[in-house]
Amino acid sequence: MKFQVKFSLNEKIFLKNPENSNTGREIVKKGIDLIYELGFENFTFKKLAHTMNTSEVTIYRYFENKHRLLLYIINWYWSFLEFLVEYKLQNVYDPKDRLKIIIQLLTQDFPETLSPLEYNKQYLNKIVIAESKVYLVKEVNEINKNQVFKPYKDLCARLASIINAYNPSYAYPHSLNSTLIETSH
């Protein structure tokens, strides 16, 4: 049985939703591959267009710039991780078991991508680790006003609630979960 995971990401990140077309999904997929291969600094829309045998204009129809593409990729990753947490925690009620599952999810390698249309989750994970500079831009406050970092914050809130369930008297569940996420990376 094959299925495709789609997330509704913040519309402020893209000009045209890449999930609504094969070209858009290919831009994201090849963008992930190329950013992983070259690094974000060496990645350009010109190189991406060349890899896709298309023009830069096609890519600019979807994303304003390469930083917006990186934001999209990273938001997709956090949404995927929250989906995995939600899926794996179904029917698990013991807070200690829930924490163990979360730690496993945060520290495990993702399975290899099988479908040619699927985003490479191993590459995604490496990009999130290597390209934390997505948050370190001059416009971060403006970007944050548009709730662009909401998938990461939602995941953190979910983890904090599980930490609270395990130890309700623990005073810093939000700090612990963000430390847990960053340490696992």
Image (cartoon, grey):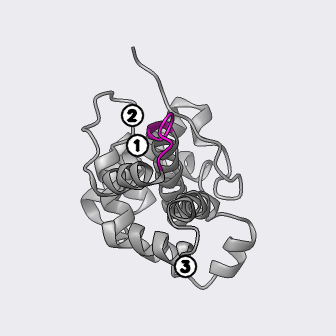
Q: Amino acid at mark 2?
A: Glu
Marks 2 & 1, CB-CB < 8 Å contact: yes
Local crowd at mark 2 within 10 Å, few (<14), some, or many (≥20)? some
Judged by depth in the image, the label closer to the viewer, 3 or 1, is 3
Q: Is residue 91 magenta?
A: yes
Residue 154 at x, y = what percent? 61, 58
For disc 2, the marked residue is 118
Tell me residue 60's x, y (percent).
58, 53
Q: Is 162 in front, or is 155?
A: 162
- Distance from disc 3 to disc 1, alpha carbons, whole Å, reads 37 Å
Q: Which amino acid, by three-letter code, is at mark 1? A: Lys
Dividing the picture into quarters, in which one does residue 107 lie? Answer: bottom left
Give the secondary structure at mark 3: loop
Image quadrant of residue 181? bottom left
Q: Assign the N terminus to one quadrant of the image.
A: top left
Work out whether mark 2 precedes mark 1 in sequence or the reverse, and give the earlier one: 1
Q: Secondary structure at mark 1?
A: helix
Magenta stretch in the rendered image: 87-94
Look at mark 3 in the image and give the residue it sits on.
Answer: 172
In the picture, the quarter occupied by the C terminus is bottom left
Instruction: Give the label, 2 or 3, closer to the camera.
Output: 3
Q: Earlier in the sequence, mark 3 or mark 1?
A: 1
Amino acid bearing label 3: Tyr
Q: Position of residue 150 (x, y in %)?
A: 64, 61
Query: Mark 2 or 3 closer to N-term?
Result: 2
| Residue of label 1 | 29
Q: Residue at x 56, y 73 (%)?
A: 174
